[in-house]
Every structure is written in structure tokens, then in C-alpha cells.
Image (tube, coloured by chain):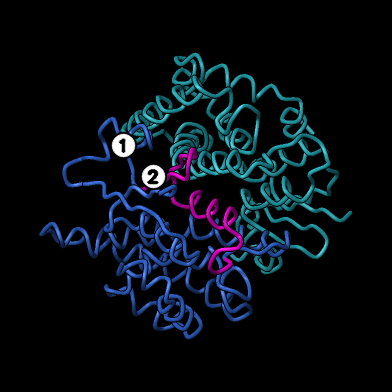
Chain colours: A cyan, B blue
Amino acid sequence: MAIKLYGSLLSTATNRVRAVLAEKDIEYEFITIDMATGEHKKPEFLSRNPFGQVPAFEDGDLKMFESRAITQYIAHAYPNKGNDLIFEDPKKMAIVAVWMEVESQKYEPIASKLVWELLLIPMYGKTPDEAIVKEYEAKMEELLVVYESRLSESKYLGGDCFTLVDLHHLPTLKCLMGTRVKKLFDARPKVSAWAAEIQSRPAWIKAITA
Amino acid sequence: MAIKLYGSLLSTATNRVRAVLAEKDIEYEFITIDMATGEHKKPEFLSRNPFGQVPAFEDGDLKMFESRAITQYIAHAYPNKGNDLIFEDPKKMAIVAVWMEVESQKYEPIASKLVWELLLIPMYGKTPDEAIVKEYEAKMEELLVVYESRLSESKYLGGDCFTLVDLHHLPTLKCLMGTRVKKLFDARPKVSAWAAEIQSRPAWIKAITA
């Protein structure tokens, strides 16, 4: 098969790419990288991603890493497959680009820190650092104030339609919804409606259950 | 004038956009936001960027923030002006997208921490935290090992030509070159040649001296 995704079902970055492949209804071969045995740090995988992080991606002779670069490539390269995730109009796409940066520069660092403290540290049998959790919950609240305002003027973060912006949030959002951080989303009507809707998309459900 | 840039000449993110406007040979109005008096946190500027950070940008009725989204918009929207900063070929552009993510996710957090410790903290009359500086110098070295390898197979990070990838590095790179971190770049022949060449581009010199 021409398209190959190397990653782990436990990796939010891998699931970001799986979500796009499901939305675009694209068949692909999934190759599990066993992170427990350090497969992502071995020479064969390092030749796919010199930083030793999942996922890596192949489309014929094209080899890529970095999940958000991969999702953008797929959304642009397969315009006639599945659901549109980008706009053709450059000004509409400019707004999508703004909010994609917000996700990657602002949402992700907060979300991934909270996922680490509230989900991963307890999995290792340790106790989350309450001061860090409170600090990052406060940062998330500040961010969600902006999201609530944005979603009051626009159905989705990038515009009137579901786009890559919303999709990029899904993997960490799903993790956060299993923690106490959910109440910060629930407290805001536009944010909570948006979070519920994007998580109920058939392609996302397919991506995380396939 | 249709194009307006709101920012500060002391802001690396503002200078990222100025660099693109210079490369594309685009005239624009520059509106200084006085960060010393907190102008970026006042309602008028918050209506341009809800996060209260420079720069903000206007092209007619389009309003944007987030420097990397703005640079991408300009590079795509003005294909016939100045120097090309992107590729038309989707597979070449996919590689540019990979290394743009590397800049924003990996280089920038390390570079901006070092700029903070080694340039800004001393400006406030304080002493950098040597442990933090050493930690981030080690991270920068790890990153530059990957860059040296990448620049051994490709003249620029995104491919055979100077693109947005290289440009996005320039504002923090310029700051780092005035610190002890310069020796980490100088120690690597491909990295130091690349850093010297991209900093000598006429458009960059124009952007930071205009």
C-alpha cells in the first residue's frame, strides 16, 4: 500500500494523523512502533524521524514526520477524497492558519502538560503535582475564555466548517475529557458544544476504535 | 495603505513578518505598539489579537495574528512579488511543512529560552540562571546535530532554496548570535555556513535596519 503510517495508538500525535486519514477516507497501512522497547529510538526509525518521535509517514517516495505537517499534506494532496478539511479561498485559509497556530503554540503545551500530570503520572503509580495542575488549569481557563468568544462568532475555530484546526485538538481533548479538566470545558456553553460535536464525528470515532 | 503591521521592532515575532514583507518586496504601513506602556493589553489591540501579543496584521478586510500564519498567508497570496519562499510542488512543500514544524515546535522553545536568559534577564540588571542556560544549551546542541545532518543533504532546511523555514529562524538566530550560544553554531560547518548565509540576505538586512 502506498500510504504507511508508523506510530502508536497511545500517541496523540499518531492519532492526529489517523483522524485525518479517516476524515479523508484514505486506506493506509499502520505499522506499530513499540515505544515500550524503545523502537522509536533505534536506527531504522531514526531514519524516518531524526528526533525519534512518532508518527512517521510515507506516501510513495515522500517521507514525512511531524503530525501537523502530515495532516496538512494529506488535506491538500487529496482534495477529492472524503471530507474537506481546508478552504480553497486564501483569506478563509489564512484564518484557519491563525487558529492552527493557536492550537499548536498555545493549546497543545497546556493540554499536554495536564494530560501528563493527570493521566500519565498516575499510570506510573505516582501522584500529580497539584501546584502544576492548578497552574495549568488556570492557563487553560484563560485560553478557553478566548475560545468561548471565538466560538460565539464562528461555529468552528477556523470558520463555518470543521477544519484541520478543530481536528488537531481532538487527540488531547479526548484525553482531557477523562480528567477533572473536563469541568473547565463544561462551564462554557459554546466550548462544550464544540467539544461534544467534534468528538462525535464518525471519522474520529472510526480513527480511535479501528 | 492596504497592508498594515502592528508590532514592535524589539519583537522577534514582529521581525519574522517584516522579513517576509521585505523578501516579497511588499510596501506596508508599520504601526508601533508600545509594549512598555502595555498597549498590547488594551482593548483596541485585543480586538486585533485576543491574546494581547504582537504582531497583528491587516490586508484590506483580512485581519490576522500569529506570525507564522501571517508569513504563510503573504507567501501564498503574493506569488508574483519579490522572492519565492514556498514551492508549488506539493511534495516539496510537504518537506517545507515538516521543517516549519521543527522550527516552531523544537527550535523556537529552546532559542527563546536562551534569548530570555542570556539577553533579556541581563537587560533587566539580573543574572542568568546558569543551570537553565546549560540545560538549554545541551538541548540546542542536540537539535544542531540534526540540523548539521539535514544541511549536509540539502542546502537549506526546507530544500534546495531558501524558504519560509529558514526565514522563520532569523529573528531568534540574530539574537543568539550576540550570545555565547554562537559557539554552538560555529562548531558545525554546515550549520554555521547556513546561519551566515541566511543572515546576509539583503531582504533580512533591510527588514532589521529599515
Please give the residue where the numbered disc 2 appears in the rendered image: B56
**Mark 2, secondary structure of its residue:** strand
Magenta stretch encompasses residue B180: no
Q: Are marks 2 and 1 on the same chain?
A: yes
> What whole-number distance in Å separates the C-alpha atoms at marks 2 and 1?
8 Å
Left of B134 or right of it: where is A156? right
Q: Is residue B69 above or below residue A62?
A: above
Identified at 53% across, 63% down, the residue is: B164
Left or right side of A100 for A62: right
Is B83 within the magenta?
yes
To which chain does the residue with label 1 belong? B
The residue lying furthest to the bottom in this view is B189
Residue drawn at point x = 17 percent, y = 47 percent: B36
Q: Is residue A7 visible?
A: yes
Badge 2 amino acid: Ala
Vertical side of A112 occupied by B98: above or below: below
Chain letter of the residue beneath label 2 in the structure image: B
Start-end of magenta stretch = B55-84
State if disc 1 and disc 2 touch (CB < 8 Å): yes
Three-letter amino acid code at the position of disc 1: Phe
Find residue B45 and name its label: 1
Q: Nearer the viewer, residue A43 or A62?
A: A62
